[in-house]
Amino acid sequence: MTHFDWLVLISAFVLIVDLVGGIAIGWWIRDANSSHDAFNAKAAIDSLRQLHDLTCDVAGRVGQHLSRVDAISQELITLRSSCKSPKDRAVVDAVSQIVQINEELTSQLSQAKLKLCKQAEVIEAQAAAAMADLVTGLPNRRGFDDELRRGMAQWQQLDTPLSIVLIDVDNLQELQQKHGQDAADDVLRGVAQILNETMRAMDFISRYSEDQFAVMFPSTHLGDAKQAAERVRSAVESRAFRVEETPVKITVSEGVTEALPGDDAETLVERTFTALAASREAGRNCAHLHDGARCEAIPPESGGARNGVNLGTEELQALARQLQSQPADPNTDPLTGLLNRRCFFEALRHRISEHNLGGEPLCLVLLDLDQLKGLNRTHGQLVGDVVLRTIAQIIRTAMRPHLDMAARYEDAKLALVLPHAELDDALAVAERIRRATAACKLRAEGAELSVTVSGGVAQLPHGGDSVGLIKLADIALKTAKTSGRNCSCYHDGVRPHTLAGSACATMA
C-alpha cells in the first residue's frame, strides 16, 4: 500500500477510537445519572475534568480530519479522471468508500461531542448540588471541609492566620418537635441570614450539621474571630423570630479557635468542638474560645450595641467633664477617638500610594448620621455627641485591626478606609455597621431614640487619587440620603447604585 493509503486508514482508525471512547463515556455518565445510589461529587468532578480534556481533544481532531478528508476527496476526483484501467478505477472507488465512511464517522463524532458537552453540564450541576444545603442555600459540611483544607494549605504555606467558629442553634430539636420541621427550617434560614449580614464577604459560611453552622475566617486572628462570634450570638438573641405569628426565643452557642503550629484540619475542628462543649455546659447562649491550652468564656458585648445606652443627666454631665479634661491630640478627634480630618487625608494619600505600588484593591466607606441636627435640637448637643461616640465604637468592632483606618470626616460624617478589600467586601462592612446602628437602643429622657446611618461606598479606580475616590463615595452617600436614608449605596465609577436588599432599594 502507498503512503496515501496508509494515511487514509490511520485517520479512519483514530476517528473510530475517538467515537467508541466518547460513546462509552456518555453511556457511563447516563448510568451514573440514573442510579439511585449517592452520587460521589469528587469522582464526578474528576470525571468532568477528564471529559473536558477528551472533548477538547476530539473537537481538535474533528476539525483536522474535516480538512484532510476534503483534500483527499479532491485528490481522488482528480485521480479517478486520470485512471485508464478498470483495476485502477476499482482501487480509487474503494478508497472513495473509505472517505465516505470517514465523513459519516465525522458526523457521528460531532453529535457525540455535543452529547458529551451536555453531560458535562449535568455533572457540573450535580457536583454543585452535592456541595449545597437545600434548606439554607449555604455550602454544606462537605463544602466546608474542602474549603477548610484549602485554607489550611494557605495557612501553612504563607503563614497567614486562620480561625473558625462552630455555632449551635440552641434547642432546635425541641422547637422541631413542638412546631414541626417547617418551623425549624424557618429558624435555620433566619440564622443563615444573620450570618450573611454580620460576616465579611471573605468569610466562608456553611451549614455544618442538622443544628450547626460553621464559619471559616481567613487572614483572621483569634481576637477578631471571637468578636465576630459574639456579634452573631448577640444578633441572634435580639432577632425577633416567629412561628405562625407566635414569638419564639432563639439563641446560639459557639466555640472559636485559631490554627496553631502543628494543627491540621482535624485537630483544629476538634479543638473548636471542645470550646463549643464548654458553651453548652455553661448553659448555652454564650461563646467560648480555645487558645490551644484551655477554654475561656468570651464576655458578652457591652455598651450601646447590645444593652443600650441610657442618656440620663448624670451620664451627660460625666461626658461633658471627660471632654473638657481630655488632653489634646493633634491626630485624633477628641469626641470619637478616631483620626481627625487632617490626619485622615494624610493617611488616605499614603494608603493610595501603597495601592498604586502593589495593585491591591482599596475602598472607602463614608457614613453619615441621619438627622443629627434634629437630634441635637430636640435633645441637646451632648446627646448627639454620645450617639456619635456609640457609632464610632460600632465602627471599631467592624474594622480589621492594624489594617483598616477610621476617621471623623466632618461633623456627622465618619470615614472608613479598607485596604485589600473589593467593593463587595466594603459593602458588606457598610451594611453591618448600618444594621448594628439601627439595632442600637439609645434612650434620652425616658424616650427611645431612633438612630440610623446612611452609607456611600466606592472602590479606588486604576490610577485614581484621594480626591476622586472621596468624590465617588460622597456621590453614593448623597444618593443614599436622597433615597430615604438608613441605607447603603455604591458608585461603580460610572454612576451610583442602591445596594440590592437594603432599605433604600426596598423603598425604590
Image (cartoon, rainbow, N blue to C red):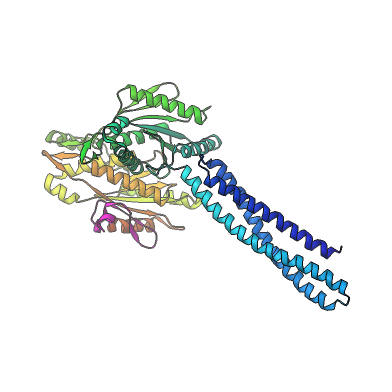
Q: Splitting the image into 4 quarters, where does residue 168 fall?
A: top left
Examine the structure image and report whether residue 56 is included in the region drawn in magenta. no
Given residues 440 and 273, the one toward you in this image is: 273
User: Eyeballing the image, is 335 above or below 22?
Assistant: above
- The quadrant in which the N terminus is found is bottom right
Query: Where residue 403 sits: x, y (%)?
Result: 41, 41
Given residues 402 and 335, the one toward you in this image is: 402
At x 25%, y 43%, the residue is 437
Q: Number of labelled discs?
A: 0
Given residues 189 and 166, the one toward you in this image is: 189
Query: Where residue 36 sits: x, y (%)?
Result: 50, 42
User: Eyeballing the image, is 470 above or below 161?
Assistant: below
Examine the structure image and report whether residue 489 is included in the region drawn in magenta. yes
* Residue 206 visible at all: yes
Viewed as shown, does residue 376 lie left or right of 157? Answer: left
Query: Where residue 341 sits: x, y (%)?
Result: 31, 49
- The quadrant in which the C terminus is found is bottom left
At x 82%, y 74%, the residue is 79
Query: Where residue 85 sits: x, y (%)?
Result: 88, 75
Given residues 470 and 455, the one toward you in this image is: 455
Viewed as shown, does residue 217 lie left or right of 71? Answer: left
At x 82%, y 64%, the residue is 5
Q: Splitting the image into 4 quarters, where does residue 9 fall?
A: bottom right
Magenta stretch?
480-508
* Residue 240 visible at all: no
